[in-house]
Image (cartoon, coloured by chain):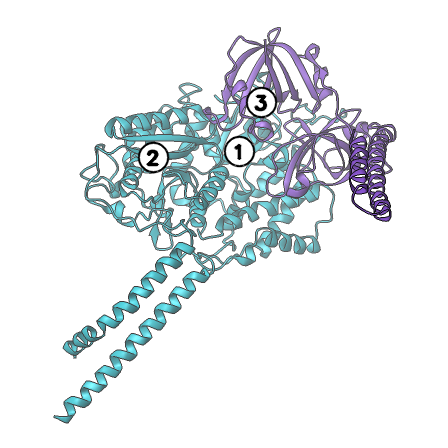
Chain colours: A purple, B cyan
Amino acid sequence: MKKFNLVLAASVMAFALAGCTAAETVEDTVNDVVDDVVDEIKDEVEDVADEVKDEVDEVVDQIVDDPAVKSEGVMTYADYVAAAVDDEIVIECYVQATQSWWDNKISVYAADADGAYFIYEMECSEEDAAKLVEGTKIKVTGFRAEWAGEVEVASGATFEFEDGCYVAEVKDVTEFVGTEELVNYINQKVCFADMTVKAVSYKNDQPGDDIYVTLTKDDTDVEFCLEYYLNGSDEEFYNLVGSLEEGATVDVECFLYWYNGADGHLTAVTVK
Amino acid sequence: MMKYIKDAFRTIKKKAVAALLLVSVGAAFLTGCHGSKEMADFTVPDSFDTTKPIEIVFWAKNDTNARQTAIYEKAVEDFEALYPNVTVTIRLYNDYGKIYNDVITNIATGTTPNICITYPDHIATYLTSENQVLCLDDIMYDEKYGLGGSELKYEGPSRADMIDKYLNEGRIGEHYYALPYMRSTEALYINKTYVEKLGYDVPDVVTWDYIWEVSEAAMKKDADDNFVINGQNVMIPFIYKSTDNMMIQMLRQQNAGYSTASGEVLLFNDNTREILEEISKHSATKAFSTFKISSYPANFLNAGQCIFAVDSTAGSTWMGPDAPLSDICSDDIISGIEVVVRPIPQFDVSNPVMISQGPSICVFNKADPQEVLASWMFAQFLLTDEVQIAYAETEGYIPVTSKAQNNAEYTDYLSRSGEDNDTYYSIKIETTRLLLNNIDNTFVTPVFNGSASVRDAAGQLIEKTVTSTRRKQAIDDAYFDELYDSIESLYRLDQIEGGGRDGAVDLGPLPTGAKALLITIAVVWCGIIIYVGRDYFSKRKKTGNR
């Protein structure tokens, strides 16, 4: 359509000019207009080529960057889990979410094809923090730690960006409530279906900080937390969680954080 | 001569008025440049206006203890009943650091609360903004509204009822900027059952050597790689909650350097290095760990995975298998272990030394003196017996007034230790008694702008040493040299300038505007003096001619 308009404009101009100028002038004008049209078509073709290239690159990335495949010198998820506390670790993973950046530190929920990681207070500039969006691939060097049962990369880890993108699927772990298998999903993004709200309380007894939520399934309690630094700024979500009523049935999604037992950091709640 | 000076002053007055006017305009202009952060000096109003609606905001700190929240709320309710034109809004925190950060942020925007719970170390930083924090020197002694004042509608403590030691902890430089609210110290919570199982007794006051020896003895494992002492695969015999306090108290017990009152940092000394070397030895065996590395000592203690836990007396309701508060699953709590309380480990058992800590109350200055007066009256209300006793009973705190400490209701409370595992929880009351018996053995560190950073640095030296040891780094002289340099740089301790108790708090370099104003004033005064001098000599000459 754009090209058609250009040609039409050129033709009209050529005819208009023809009526009042000499033949040479008309020829020059037509040549100019044709040049413009050719340039425009070239630009169009280049744009299309760029788009195609981007799409091809993305497909290639997906083929080449298998989240289960690690670069040389990088641990597999199994190696990471098997490492002892205070061992040095090098992992490749994909950001799934971050807590708020503060004082050149950021805590990251990350995953690869085999499992998930919680990277506590990773060293990070504010500028880089803005780039740690969902799916971003990073290589992290640090030390393995455990804090109140949570398996994590200790404070002070460093990272570098890598090419690649991966968002882990949410896994339904409802069937593992009250079993020892639940911990196998530690730090992963998981969901629990048809849970009953048992208790909701604000840290410090008033809104403005974390919200603690206890849900039950077949008389087994599971603890959850709306972690303020993860999604406290989402007012609608904060209000929804804060107003959950005892006895309500809910589906929830969370990162399966651990604090002396499962303590999921909520990311979504559906009241049924 | 005096008459002459008066005359001369009259002569120059007209010219000087013009000059001073210029200076005043300049001053106003330059003050404006300095920002709206500055506040006029507060003067106690003649009377409190009970008709005008006043809203005050109180940032309160609790220890994740719902009873404390309820006490704050009741205090507000009772105060509002006495002063119906005053509305108090509470914002609750459970972390001093967060209050500190929020106050700093709000000083910049002129939106500080009216009152907050805080540490004197933090107030020293607030004081870098002029007139933000209410100086209590005058108001405290005001006949009508001061401590025990005649116009107060409640029976607050008089100046004589305030325990001097605690009141003086709110003195920064030459002035009072904080009222004490509650006082606590640290206590050593001991799993006596396991200590005796290891073949040791529990003395009344334990030494550091004793702690290290018993802790190492508890590290023995069986053929299944479980710890012999508890049959579990987890055992951290000694966990310290606040490593800041650990370093500060270990240094103080040895009369070693930490900081001076004027802000000189003495932390990086040979005693510190010896302490770190000892800590490193026991970190290598994993007989010692910290809250930051391993989590809350109470959780390990109650699960039979820790023998010595040092934490605040204000955390006593979490300590012991029968503690009213707990963070771990009841199935994980080992019942049947006996937990006893002792002072923190000492180098010299005949001269025990421990830190004095706990919340203080800070009142912020505001443009409306009535609002400030209402804030001050509410702050004082928190010192009434009713609030003091109720709050002290929530944890191992002691009231800060002799009036409350001697109140029959409070002494009755202390006498009922162990009657239940709630209000009269024995470990809580034991920690309270521990502090009451050791008030004279407590100390505080010097307060100056930057003292909060020195405290952080003290703790970080331990945290870094433990972490590095666990990660099998070489802990030698080169390590400590580098550690000292990095910690000093991280906390900018080399940039702290003198201040503190013996002089004005360091407010940093003067702003350019202020410098220009001072120079202008100096120039004008020089002009005045020159004029006066010339006029004087000129008149003397004329008189001589008679």
Q: Chain of mark 3?
A: A
B381 left or right, relative to B445: left
Residue type at the position of mark 1:
Val
Total numbered circles? 3
Query: Foreground: A109 or B17?
Result: B17
Q: Which mark is residue A225?
A: 3
Please tell me in which quadrant of the rendered image residue B178 appears. top left
The alpha-carbon separation of the residues under discs 3 and 1 comes to: 41 Å
Q: Residue at x 81, y 38 (%)?
A: A15
Q: Nearer the viewer, mark 3 or mark 1?
A: 3
Q: Which residue is mark 1?
A: B202
Q: Which residue is mark 2?
A: B56
Q: Chain of mark 2?
A: B
Category of crowding for the residue at label 3, using alpha-carbon neighbours closer than 10 angstroms: few (below 14), some (14–19), many (at least 20): many
Percent position of residue B310, x then y: 53, 36
Please tell me in which quadrant of the rendered image residue B23 appears. bottom left
